[in-house]
Image (cartoon, rainbow, N blue to C red):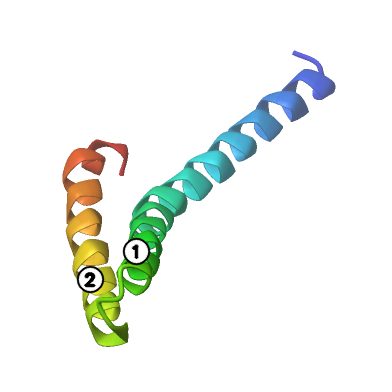
């Protein structure tokens, strides 16, 4: 193996580690946060009040975080 091929293999491994870290963070935090934010604004638009919208956002965030952890736990 030449030095260039060895370097490409090491770069590919580093890229794979970075990709897995980014996708793990996006799945664990990004998806629940996006759903919670959507519920927050849905609560505001439907005139349920600010406190109810915040409560909806928190409940949806916790619920979706648990669901993500249960169904995507094999990636960790």
Check the image and report above or below for 69 versus 19.
below
Discs 2, 1 touching: Cβ within 8 Å: yes
Mark number displayed over residue 42: 1
Q: Position of residue 37 (x, y in %)?
A: 40, 65
Give the residue displayed 25% in from the left and 73% down from the top.
Answer: 58
For label 2, the residue is 56
Mark number displayed over residue 25: none
N-terminal label among 2 and 1? 1
- Comparing 17 with 43, the one in front is 43
Answer left or right for 54 relative to 16: left
Give the residue displayed 34% in from the left and 64% down from the top.
Answer: 42
Crowd rating for badge 2 (residues with CA inside 10 Å; few <14, some 14–19, many 20+): many
Answer left or right for 51 relative to 20: left
Mark 2–mark 1 Cα distance, whole angstroms, equals 9 Å
Check the image and report above or below for 3 versus 25.
above
Check the image and report above or below for 42 versus 15.
below
- Secondary structure under the numbered disc 2 in the rendered image: helix
Give the residue displayed 38% in from the left and 52% down from the top.
Answer: 31
- Comparing 31 with 56, the one in front is 56
- Comparing 11 with 29, the one in front is 29
Q: Report the residue that reaches farthest toward the top.
A: 1
- Secondary structure under the numbered disc 1 in the rendered image: helix
Check the image and report above or below for 47 versus 2.
below
Q: For the image shown, how many numbered marks are present on the structure? A: 2
């Amino acid at each position: 193996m030449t030095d260039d091929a060895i370097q490409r293999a090491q770069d590919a491994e580093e890229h794979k580690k970075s990709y897995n870290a980014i996708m793990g963070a996006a799945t664990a935090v990004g998806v629940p946060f996006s759903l919670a934010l959507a519920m927050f604004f849905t609560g505001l638009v439907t005139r349920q009040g600010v406190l109810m919208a915040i409560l909806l956002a928190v409940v949806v965030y916790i619920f979706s975080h648990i669901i993500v952890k249960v169904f995507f736990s094999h990636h960790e």
